[in-house]
Image (cartoon, rainbow, N blue to C red):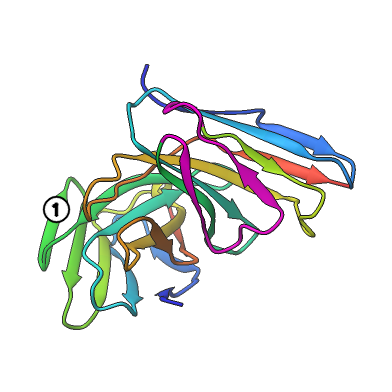
């Protein structure tokens, strides 16, 4: 089955700990994205990557880091510097060609930091 | 910051009626427009994409685009209770590298 997987579905951490969220896709998509969604809010872009070994900051990159060592994988690390890390984190992928940017989402990871 | 605006709702319609969801965007150079459906607690699902002025139909869904008015809409015909969800409008950013999402409109279809 082709698709995007995110793990784990739920994640609980203590304040001050770094945590890494996994995102894998087997759709052969070039572009991958990380979004954050808070209750009653739209999706806010954290980081995105158009090709392997390259990524750009989105609107709310502070306190987050990413890597793109393989086309299929785009892990997100939530660092202790992120002031309000509790949120629903969504990974997406897309062909990333030209101006046609259909994006497909994984099931998401709910992170709770206490 | 370029914006995508949606009425948060809730929009309530009876089963079998037409639901009309609206979205405006601020960047005139936007070329790609998308509608996503998000059920409570789930991730967004792409249901429609539109790139040219006019209407695009797919089953019970019709997307309408008016670039001059910077307006895109989604019509859902014969609404069903299973259509109850939040609908997100998305538009490509100026660089064409990512999407900008509205906050979504919550639709409630009553049986």
Q: Is residue B83 above or below residue A2?
A: below
Locate residue A78: give its quadrant: top right
Q: Is residue A46 left or right of residue B80?
A: right
Name the residue beneath numbered marker 1. B57
Locate residue B54: give its quadrant: bottom left
Is A54 magenta? The answer is: yes
> Residue B42 or A58: which is nearer the viewer?
A58
Q: Is residue A70 left or right of residue B28?
A: right
Q: Is residue B18 above or below residue A15?
A: below
The residue sitting at 42% across, 59% down in the picture is B88
Element type at mark 1 = strand
The residue sitting at 35% across, 65% down in the picture is B93
As drawn, which residue projects farthest toward the top? A1
Locate residue A9: give its quadrant: top right
Q: Mostly what secondary structure, the magenta segment?
A: loop
Instruction: Bin the neighbour count of mark 1 within 10 Å (Cα to Cα): few under 14, some 14-19, many 20 and up.
Output: few
Location of residue B69 in the rendering, given as x and y in whole percent from the top left corner: 21, 83
Q: Start and end of the magenta stretch? A: A52-73
The number of discs equals 1
The residue sitting at 11% across, 63% down in the picture is B52
Location of residue B51 in the rendering, given as x and y in whole percent from the top left corner: 16, 59
Location of residue B1 in the rendering, given as x and y in whole percent from the top left corner: 46, 77
Q: Is residue A102 left or right of residue B59?
A: right
């Amino acid at each position: 089955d082709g698709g995007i997987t995110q793990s784990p579905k739920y994640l609980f951490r203590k304040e001050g700990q770094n945590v890494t969220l996994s995102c894998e896709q087997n759709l052969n998509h070039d572009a991958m994205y990380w979004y954050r969604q808070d209750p009653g809010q739209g999706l806010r872009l954290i980081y995105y990557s158009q090709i392997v070994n390259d990524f750009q900051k989105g609107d709310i990159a502070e306190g987050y880091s990413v890597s793109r060592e393989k086309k299929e994988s785009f892990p997100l690390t939530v660092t202790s510097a992120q002031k309000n890390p509790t949120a629903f984190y969504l990974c997406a992928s897309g062909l990333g060609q030209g101006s046609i940017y259909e994006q497909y989402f994984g099931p998401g990871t709910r992170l709770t930091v206490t | 910051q370029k914006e995508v605006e949606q009425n948060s709702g809730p929009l309530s319609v009876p089963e079998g009626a037409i639901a009309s969801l609206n979205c405006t965007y601020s960047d005139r150079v936007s070329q790609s427009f998308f509608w996503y459906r998000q059920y409570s607690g789930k991730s967004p699902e792409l249901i429609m994409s539109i790139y040219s002025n006019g209407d695009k139909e797919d089953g019970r869904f019709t997307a309408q685009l008016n670039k001059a008015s910077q307006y895109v809409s989604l019509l859902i015909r014969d609404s069903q209770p299973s259509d109850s969800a939040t609908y997100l409008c998305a538009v490509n950013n100026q660089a064409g590298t990512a999407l900008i999402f509205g906050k979504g409109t919550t639709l409630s279809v009553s049986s």
